Amino acid sequence: MKVDVALTLALVPDDLSARDVAVVIDVVRATTTLVAALDAGALGVRPVGDLGEARALAAEHGVLLAGERQGHPPPGFHLGNSPREMTSDVVGGRELVLTTTNGTQAVVRCRGAGTILAGALVNAEATARAALAAEPERVLLVCAGSRGEVAADDVAAAGCLVGNLALLAGAEPGDGARIAAALFDAWRHDLLGLLRRSRSGQHVIEEGLEPDLAVCARVDALPLAVGLDGGGVLRKLGSS
Amino acid sequence: MKVDVALTLALVPDDLSARDVAVVIDVVRATTTLVAALDAGALGVRPVGDLGEARALAAEHGVLLAGERQGHPPPGFHLGNSPREMTSDVVGGRELVLTTTNGTQAVVRCRGAGTILAGALVNAEATARAALAAEPERVLLVCAGSRGEVAADDVAAAGCLVGNLALLAGAEPGDGARIAAALFDAWRHDLLGLLRRSRSGQHVIEEGLEPDLAVCARVDALPLAVGLDGGGVLRKLGSS
């Protein structure tokens, strides 16, 4: 089995097939937030690109709207894009629509893969185990990045997953996987420091939401795997 | 001053300006080979994309033709793309044309920069010093990669340059620069091991040219800076 890392969406290979597992990673903050929502009892999270589509879905199906523009919930939204907002009293038993830009593009870009998972530092080991359970030929870790540029937070989480996959299955790493593993290893004892210094982290700090970064930096704090179902909704695996 | 790394050519920003220095990096093997040629007394190296253009230049100007397709010199070429071929008795006092694909594309992609240098592990510190001498607003380290994919050898050399720039000038690293620095730090005591494991290195080994990798892995072994002149020729800086 091979494991490789697409360091940005531009580097996702064109040859994704049903034998591949793709893991979409957007640590600060989309995938951390949606894992937190599912951990808190949300039934599903639908990633949606634009605000209009999100509002239409909410009007039609009575789902909770979550997302951000410049760090805050757009008008009419129930929730922002902060993992700290995803408490069971707010999201338990509900379906969410989460508007993201990078994260949604990443899901679309991975459409050819047989299985699509959502990974972050908070669920790294659970995600690695779920990826292996699919017995793929290749696990491709897809860093969503930020507006086309590489994001250190995503690459660090990819590196954490590479380590898990190497440990669990002796997966053979490509160049991108070695690069990501080196970043995670260099910062594993100060992931919060890396997130604070990253461009994504700097934006969150500027928006006054620095405590979110501590949540995003906690490895394996939310041990659940999340997969995309046939209807385009991200759900906790092992439930339905 | 900022320092950042474009991990592949697709990630080179569109806003390169005259205030930027771009360093093109293709460790295995184009930039190592051309630095070796200039160190051995070649007067200049012109990077050219295709074989026909290279042959036309050679016919017209009597230059030496160097390059490879599948690891060996194409018909009519005087030299391959191996740094071990670049000895003073062969290249001393001569102009070379070097056909590369990734390396040439990288030079074209960096056209907007005020200064374009060619960097590798063998001339990392000299390249960092030359970049700083231009007093740029930004140093962009451009990893040529391999057929659009990220190449660990190039990223490691970029990380080595990031370390030098941080030491010499306290340069402020972006996310790409932190990623590259972590890769170099992880492998700094076994760069040859990293090159052997990289996809580019694997190709060189398959072609029977493994000893080239030891040359490519030697940090600061050839302490000269190389810059592109106005005529599109790479020359040793400090000479003309």
Image (cartoon, coloured by chain):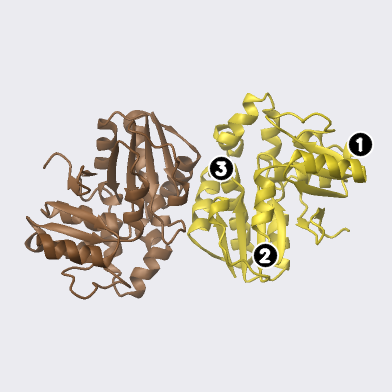
Chain colours: A yellow, B brown
Q: Residue at (65%, 59%) from the top-left corner?
A: A110
Q: Position of residue B169 (x, y in %)?
A: 34, 29
Q: Is residue B8 visible?
A: no
- Label 3 crowd (10 A; few <14 / some 14-19 / many >=20): many
- Label 1 crowd (10 A; few <14 / some 14-19 / many >=20): few
Left or right: where does residue A184 sit relative to residue B125? right
- Residue highlighted by disc 3: A151
Q: Quadrant of residue B167?
A: top left
Q: Residue at (70%, 48%) from the top-left corner?
A: A104
Left or right: where does residue A214 sit relative to residue B141? right
Location of residue A70 with respect to A58 vertically, above or below: above
Q: Residue at (15%, 63%) from the top-left corner?
A: B58
- Residue highlighted by disc 1: A89
Q: Amino acid at mark 1?
A: Asp
Q: Is residue A69 visible?
A: yes
Q: Nearer the viewer, residue B142 or B161?
A: B142
Q: Amino acid at mark 2?
A: Ala
Could you confirm whether marks 2 and 3 are on the same chain? Answer: yes
Q: Position of residue A47 (x, y in %)?
A: 76, 48
Q: Quadrant where the C terminus of chain A lies?
A: bottom right
Front tag of 2 and 3: 2
Q: Earlier in the sequence, mark 1 or mark 3?
A: 1
Q: Which mark is residue A113?
A: 2
